[in-house]
Image (cartoon, helix red, strand yellow):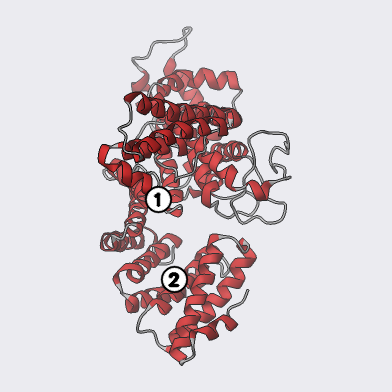
């Protein structure tokens, strides 16, 4: 599928754009600035900075053209060409600098892709072998009747002997084989799978990954100074460090390349467990959560990790579940980065692929992601229709007390609160959900706390909230802020959001009590 978001509209500064608009040079300025800042369709403005010399040279040429336009002159074609060439040179210089700085990251995702082809072939081998084992001896004999003998041996007898000795062949067994034997078994299928890869798309994904990693490193420069990667302990790497999780103090500083290597190893090691169960969320957990604090990455670091995940599995066919999971992870971090249109484009494409699959659990996951994107672009009625349907399906599949059922019901409530004004219905849903969740979920777990937060959010957002409703919301957010700061740290987005909710609740409470808003400041201090 096409990973196409909406292209960022970079414009030149106000007076230059106004003066130039009549002759089209505004487009030149916008396009040139777009090249200078980085033309990735998934990156915000300023995410990619050209090397200083190349950027300065490009700006000199471009500014000369703009000065000429402001003075009433029509830019010469050669000047326009020079400006475009300067912007191209700046962009090329940045790409080369990024490739050099993040050579280890590019090497890591290339190794991940090569290993993933073996993983994909190994999974197919296991599934085919299970199908063989499921046959009766008579069925296997018929299936092998047309097969040629090998060294005089009867293939049907050889198969039966292998079935007796390997009736529980699993993915772990293939991973544990000596590498020469594993390659002999899988090599032909690995080569066939490699032909499905879109090399142009892989190259583009690698480029965007490197740009995202460069932006993350830049944003983390102040906090990472003098630190060492906790995985490789290399303090001389040119790559630069990042930290975007709930780790505090000297913990959690790491190279994006090391995170990508670790996450893929975890993916391979846990895939066998996923094949034994439909509850296989943990296969991708290290692409989403820090190993040390076990909390989700966020901000530019989360986006960089998500691009590395997509790059690591970009050799897979467009309909492959692993690739779709990687795309879903990227869409999630794009949403967190408030690039909602891009996330929606990815999720709509994913839904078009899986909507006719027989695997209902996959359809539920992708539809839920799509509903999330609908919420972010204010299509609340569409989102609510999906969440109600998914809640009904989860009730049938897993029952009322399953975590996923409770989460779907909470999403129904959230959509009612956020976009449709259904505060009373949302409150009833959340109280019923919390009554069940209190019996089956840990009280200080992230999911249970998010349920409590949703109830409190609906209470204080309700224009008709009573004084008792506001007092309940205040008490809930006060407690949640204490717990969240302990778990996530002061700067985590979850903490900031809940503290803002507490502040707004106290402001509404002050109005309800007849106190001036200025009195709220005295009661809100952390």
Q: Residue at x 58, y 37 (%)?
A: 265
Between 476 and 250, the residue placed more toward the observer is 250
* Other residues around mark 2 within 10 Å, as few (<14) / some (14–19) / many (≥20): many
Residue 136 in percent (x, y) is at: 38, 31
**Quadrant occupied by the C terminus:** bottom right
The spot of residue 428 in percent (x, y) is 37, 78
Q: Give the class, few, some or many, for how many residues have Cα within 10 Å of label 1's Cα (few <14, many ≥20).
A: many
- Viewer-nearest residue: 71 or 127: 71
Q: Secondary structure at mark 1?
A: loop
436, above or below 490, in the image: below
Mark 2: secondary structure: helix
Residue at (56%, 77%) from the top-left corner?
A: 478
- Residue 163 % position (x, y): 48, 28
Residue under the point 58% across and 55% down: 295
Q: Residue furthest bottom?
A: 514
Residue 339 numbered mark, or none: 1
Marker disc for residue 199: none
Quarter of the rendering containing residue 379: bottom left
Q: In this view of the protein, which residue sits in the foreground, 413 or 504?
A: 504
**Horizontal side, residue 442 vs residue 340: left or right:** right
Q: Find disc 2 in the rendering and name its residue.
A: 454
Mark closer to the chain start, 1 or 2 = 1
């Amino acid at each position: 599928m096409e990973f196409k978001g909406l292209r960022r509209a970079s414009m030149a500064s106000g007076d230059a754009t106004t003066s130039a608009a009549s002759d089209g040079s505004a487009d030149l300025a916008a396009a040139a600035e777009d090249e200078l800042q980085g033309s990735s369709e998934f990156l915000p403005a300023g995410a990619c900075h050209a090397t200083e010399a190349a950027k300065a040279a490009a700006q000199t040429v471009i500014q000369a053209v703009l000065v000429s336009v402001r003075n009433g002159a029509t830019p010469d074609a050669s000047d326009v060409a020079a400006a475009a060439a300067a912007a191209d040179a700046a962009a090329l210089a940045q790409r080369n600098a990024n490739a050099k700085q993040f050579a280890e990251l590019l090497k890591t995702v290339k190794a991940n892709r090569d290993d993933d082809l073996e993983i994909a072939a190994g999974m197919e081998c296991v599934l085919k072998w299970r199908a063989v084992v499921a046959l009766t001896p008579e069925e296997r004999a018929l299936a092998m009747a047309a097969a040629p003998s090998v060294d005089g041996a009867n293939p049907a007898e050889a198969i039966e002997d292998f079935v007796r000795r390997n009736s529980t062949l699993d993915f772990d067994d293939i991973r544990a084989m000596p590498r020469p034997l594993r390659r002999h078994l899988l090599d032909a299928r690995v080569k066939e799978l490699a032909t499905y890869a879109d090399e142009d798309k892989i190259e583009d994904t690698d480029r965007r990954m490197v740009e995202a990693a460069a932006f993350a490193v830049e944003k983390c420069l102040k906090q990472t100074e003098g630190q060492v990667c906790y995985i490789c302990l290399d303090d001389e790497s040119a790559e630069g460090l990042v930290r975007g999780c709930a780790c505090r103090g000297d913990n959690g500083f790491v190279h994006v390349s090391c995170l990508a290597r670790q996450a893929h190893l975890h993916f391979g090691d846990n895939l066998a467990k996923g094949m034994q169960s439909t509850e296989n969320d943990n296969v991708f957990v290290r692409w989403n959560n820090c190993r040390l604090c076990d909390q989700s990455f966020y901000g530019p670091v989360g986006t960089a990790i998500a691009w590395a995940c997509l790059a690591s599995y970009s050799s897979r066919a467009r309909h492959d579940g692993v690739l779709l999971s990687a795309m879903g992870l990227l869409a999630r971090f794009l949403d967190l980065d408030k690039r909602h249109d891009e996330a929606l484009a990815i999720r709509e494409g994913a839904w078009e692929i899986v909507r006719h699959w027989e695997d209902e659990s996959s359809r539920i996951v992708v539809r839920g992601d799509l509903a999330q994107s609908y919420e972010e672009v204010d299509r609340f009625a569409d989102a609510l229709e999906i969440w109600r349907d998914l809640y009904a399906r989860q009730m049938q599949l897993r029952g009322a007390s399953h975590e996923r059922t409770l989460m779907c019901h909470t999403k129904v409530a959230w959509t009612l609160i956020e976009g449709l004004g259904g505060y009373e219905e949302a409150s009833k849903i959340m109280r019923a959900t919390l009554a069940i969740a209190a019996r089956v979920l840990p009280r200080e777990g992230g999911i249970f706390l998010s349920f409590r937060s949703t109830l409190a959010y609906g209470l204080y957002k309700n224009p008709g909230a009573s004084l008792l409703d506001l007092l309940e919301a205040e008490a809930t957010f006060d407690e949640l802020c204490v717990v969240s700061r302990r778990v996530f740290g002061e700067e985590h987005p979850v903490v900031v959001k809940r503290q803002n909710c507490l502040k707004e609740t106290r402001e509404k409470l002050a109005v309800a009590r007849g106190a001036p808003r200025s009195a709220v400041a005295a009661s809100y201090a952390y």
